[in-house]
Amino acid sequence: MADVAEAAEQILVSTVEAPHDTPADWTPNVLAFACHYCAFAAADLAGVMRLSYSPSVKIIRLPCTGKLDHIHILSAFEKGVDGVFAAG
Amino acid sequence: MSLLSNSTKRGSVLIVGGGIGGMQAALDLADSGFKVHMVQRDPSIGGTMVMLDKTFPTGDCAMCMISPKMVEAGRHLNIDVHTLAEVISVEGDAGDFRVKVKVAPRFVDADKCTGCGDCEVKCPKKVPSNFDQKLGQRKAIYSLFPQAVPNTRAIDSSQCICLNDPDKKRCRLCEKACKAGAINYEDKGKEIELNVGSIILSPGLELYDARVRQELGLGRWQNVVSSIQFERILSASGPYKGVVQRPSDQKHPVKVAWIQCVGSRDNRNANPWCSSVCCMYATKQSIIAKEHDKNIEPTIFFMEMRAFGKDFDKYVERAKNEYGVRYQRAMVSAIREEPGTGNLFMKYAAEDGSLMTEKFDMVVLSVGFQPHCDAEAFAKTFGIETTPYLFPKTSPFAPVRTSREGVFVTGIYQGPKDIPETVMQGSSVAGSVMALLAEARGTETIEKELPPEKDVAGEAPRIGVFVCHCGTNISSTVNIDEVVAAVKDQPGVTYVTNTIYACAQDNQDMIKQTIKEQNLNRVVIASCTPRTHEKLFQETIREAGLNKYLFDLADIREQCSWCHKGQNEVATKKAIGIVKMSVAKSRLQEPLKSETVGVTPECLIIGGGIAGMTAALSLADQGFPVHIVEKDSELGGLVKGVYRTLEGLDVQEFLKDRIEAVKEHPGITVHTGAEVKQTDGFVGNFKTLLTDGSAVEHGAVILATGGIEYQPTEYLYGQSPNVLTQRQLEKRIAEGENPKAGERYIMVQCVGSREEPNQYCSRVCCQDAVKNAIAVKQLNPEAEVMIIYRDIRTYGLREDFYKQARDLGVIFIRYDVDRKPEVAQSGNKVTVRTWDYMLNRELSLEADWLVLSTGLRPHPTTDQVGAMYKVTRNPDGYFLEAHVKLRPVDFPSEGLFVAGLGHAPKNIDETVTQALAASGRAGVVLSHKRLAVSGIIAKHKRELCMSCLSCLRVCPFGSPYIAEDGKISHNEIKCMGCGICAGICPAKAFQVNNFRDDQILAMIDAAVESEPGVLN
Amino acid sequence: MFAARRIEYVKTLLKKVGIDPARLEMYNLSAAMGPRWAEMCDEFVDRIRNLGPSPIWLASRKQSEKGVTEQ
Amino acid sequence: MIVGKQKPFDEIWDMVKGFKKVLVYGCNTCVAICHAGGSKEAELLASMLRMRAKQEGLDLLIDSAGIERHCEPEFFEPLDEKVKTYDLILSTACGVGVNFLADRLAGAIPVYPGINTSFYGAVPEAGFFVELCGGCGNCILHLTGGICPIVRCSKSLMNGPCGGTDKGKCEVSSETDCAWFLIVERMKKLGTLEKLFEVQPPRDWSTATHGGPRRISLEHIRAYEAEEEKKATLTGEGK
């Protein structure tokens, strides 16, 4: 867990993307691809436990993350999504 | 009961206890034509397993595995779950029992309750949670754990403010909170009477109360916890949310000690038996703790490391080498708390007797199992005999049968065991009941009558959207009216409404009515998670004549209102997004046909040993014709060389009985001297050609290929006349060659086991040594027996015989694998030199007989048979089951099952258990005239496919195959719908029904649509 | 397993088109890890917040602004 | 089969950026099997190009499509009309396909390559491709135990290993087996080692690319097809 946090620290400034200003009306738009049996269930449990977290994440349920296709991810970015994660 | 009637057997079964073993039995039975009544003391089913964090040796999450099973059992049309219930009397005989069950008041009406949990939020009374082992709290109205089944809360009458007020006037807050009006303070409970053909006892065991061992300080020193408490500490949903911390000060402990055998293997303050699982769970806990917090330094204090199961030794080696877990042989005498710090001083005697003191931050007591405190009364209620320890009396040859006909036993109540053995026994008891009640199969089960399906093909989508308030669970955070308004204009949506509880019976009727009135051809319900409610709603729309796959569930509760409380505006916006995504998917939904395939109700069993014959008899008694293929010229297998069990029963007599029974059974065809030549097919429809020329058509296969004994090359075997194997010694004793006075027998353990390249325990050799040692001593007390061992693994109730051997004067000397005994011939004797760790010096011993405890190997045909049926072998050459924990007799491909030594080394009782389990699992398949295939499968478009074989190589279920025309085809019957093929196919020839690419892309579009700034 | 490798590969594709690969991640978690899910979502959204809007989003915004002024 | 690898994205972008309407055109045979240029890869590449174009503010329309094979005319026909609406075809077929389509379009629309055609190879496991044949037009595998020294020896030596053979490995790369070591071991097993001592005449390289573009004409098949066509024309069914 600590490693993930450190990694998050390190990428404060992107080396890939050009610097830019963030418009005031922007909010992060994140898509999650979640395996029905693992991550989707974990997301359910987070709700059952009434844990509060960012509302920026919307979930697309997959039967298994092995189903996840490259084009799903690229399409999401092409449409303007700010971040994508897969969880399984 | 009339003696004249042909069959008075009932087609229903009572299962007492709803843990994983009971659930397995229930599902197997209910899936194969029997009505099941499950009686459970707790307010939820689940048993012990639901309390565990992860499981050994795979590290799988316990809840992930058991939760779908609980949901399935809870929803099953032919399983009635009676919680908070206990059996009070049993009358009648096998085939026709009359049982009285007392159901305690729940104070919540299950028919009205929707499980929303509003009541629990409002309840002002907090009490320590027994589920969290008092490390956390729950309310007086509660559910045992978040995934509880049934999902109906219960009021704890001893804690409830209202129920403890004589006028019942105080509090009543839950009653006010419940919009469904489900609270009933006047609930008196009830008594019900059940009429069943058979009874299965799976009540489990309770944990030893380690407070009895005062010197260890549980309950006295806060940072001494029991292993089950530690399990809750590790659990991500436990009281500390998976953070390893000390109860006293929430500090992260560094030095953590586990003390083994607390409450086990101890005649004085505790129980004499071995609890079988503690060595492994301590290893698991130390590994998981280390994974949660890499600073932790675990030490396990143990007497003997009993890693006897499949891949257990490898797990312990990994703990040592990869996780740095320290294993210390010791007897712990006392624990004292350091005043002020909460640290603990532990006093222990090391193996050589030296006394040590060591400081730890936290100590975990590995507590064992014991029968429930009311075990005696329990046994009396069911009229079964018990052992002096109050376990039910069973025989190694019939491990699930009690003294009363028709009453069976399964799970840890039968004897301590781990999860896969419990699951295995669950299926095995199911198999036994199927055989007993064969003619009554299907007499009491019900099937739902459904209206014909409306043909909606080619129609434009007419989507109906129902947005659920869930009392106030959703509506207090999400503005339902806004959601309804936002969805109205979505293309394809023709009707939108809101509902208070979509899942309540009256609203279900309303949904069905609306489908008809509005002529809807697709339905989206925005409420809770599909994981618990999708099937319910699918059934609802099916009852209204719609194909059940024309449905989608938008989760705006678990994944929206519950986790964004207080942020009403953003939560509403997100809910709108979620519903729009569902609508986008729904628009592209098509009715799916659930194909069915016929079943040949016959079974092929490969291997005619104890496993094969036991399974054959059980299946033939169930009424299914069976073919046994045996490579040898006669039946019997490896057990032909075994004379007695550890308990002293005559194995040869048992074998003779079995062979005769098999030969006489009209339903069994035996093919001796034959092997499988060629095979083809899939579940329900296999075709196998044998070398004797016969062709068998069968619906299921059991691989019972068995094992062989290792032929030693070490310790002068084959060179010295003084060196024997245990099997040879057993034969000599059976043939009447008695040990002479003064004769010395030295036995060496782990010959050909627990060492690379055979890094696994053969499980039977410790018992063989103890059995033969006892026999020698009993035949002639003047003969001397010494056993040179690494760990004596007389697990479970076998521990008694280890003690008996010691009492008879058998001497046990431990050795280490890097300091093995050395053997040399000296005249007509052999000299054995070995290091004695207790005396700390080398011993030189002369022996008349050196007896080698040789390990087991899979039968040489395992590979060939495995390749033929396309099932995997593990690196040790044993068959690899579908799931190490929950599918211990299945293969990943349906219709194939495993039993006996081909799966892993095991004792006769365990082989019988697994064989019965295979018969139970096969019975489920064979009892169906046709098998239904799920609609959610991958569809293969052959015209797009260029047979690149990517799918063939990655599919875990072997459903893509190279067809006769040399091109890839797809067997949809084997497909489980995971979509790995669709992910890898470079030609996009695979699409998973209801998860098609166009549907996922439409959902992505919908997810983006409502966000500001993005225009497309 | 397949997904993890696929994600790694798609990260390289994103980099090629000027999108920070940190905008894509694979997480492993079991059904019992409710708290981890919540933590993970917050972590990831924080990361995205730091990175700001995606270049595609910004480009779309620019395009539409241009469109508006041209009109 | 033919194995290829997608060109570096920047190189592709440079080819594409000056155009207005581009079709990424995949071929669903060899290059799809090696995950380089089938429909799926074409779709991914198109998506990436669109993202790049958007960021650069270019008004560039990019679509993708795929057909079974780019080396036979009949497969092109259903998409011919659509193809003509673009001003660049970025083909992800092998070099054969790019040539063949460019010939078909005869200068009306440019056809650019999206992949580099690498070699003829086998697929020993999913996602792994190895070169086993050079297509030299004059096969000697019967003389070398079924192992081709022309492509499997780094130096294409014809007369046994060089001095750089090292415990079965090649001096050029320790990951490469020495082909001649393999040949000798294989021929020992086949019991045909003595064949290596037979003196072979100098090799005829005219069948390789040295002799200009190669053609193979199967007259029996061509004649049959021509006849069929004639028949069809006579009965008025022809085009």
Image: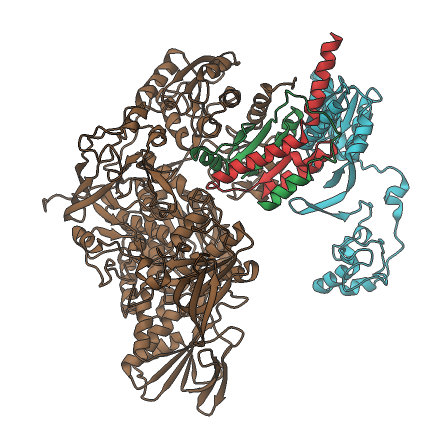
Chain colours: A green, B brown, C red, D cyan
| Outermost residue to the front | B340
Q: Is residue B477 left or right of residue C9?
A: left
Name the spot of residue B761 as percent of width and height, x first. 45, 65
Name the spot of residue B651 as percent of width and height, x first. 30, 68
**Quadrant into which the C terminus of chain B falls:** top right
Q: Is residue B676 left or right of residue B924?
A: right
| Quarter of the image where one finds residue B672 | bottom left
Q: Residue at x 36, y 57 (%)?
A: B218
Task: Note whether B763 is above or below B569 in the view shown.
Answer: below
Viewer-closest of B323 and B167: B167
Evaluate whether residue D161 shows in this view: yes
Task: Note whether B985 is above or below B478 in the view shown.
Answer: below
Name the spot of residue D2 as percent of width and height, x first. 74, 40
Task: Note whether B873 is above or below A65 in the view shown.
Answer: below
Viewer-closest of B302 and B424: B302
Total labels drawn: 0
Task: Note whether B869 is above or below D47 in the view shown.
Answer: below
Name the spot of residue B958 as percent of width and height, x first. 52, 43
Q: Is residue D217 left or right of residue A56?
A: right
**Quadrant into which the N terminus of chain B falls:** top left
Evaluate whether residue B906 shows in this view: no
| Outermost residue to the bottom | B827
Q: Residue at x 62, y 18 (%)?
A: B1012
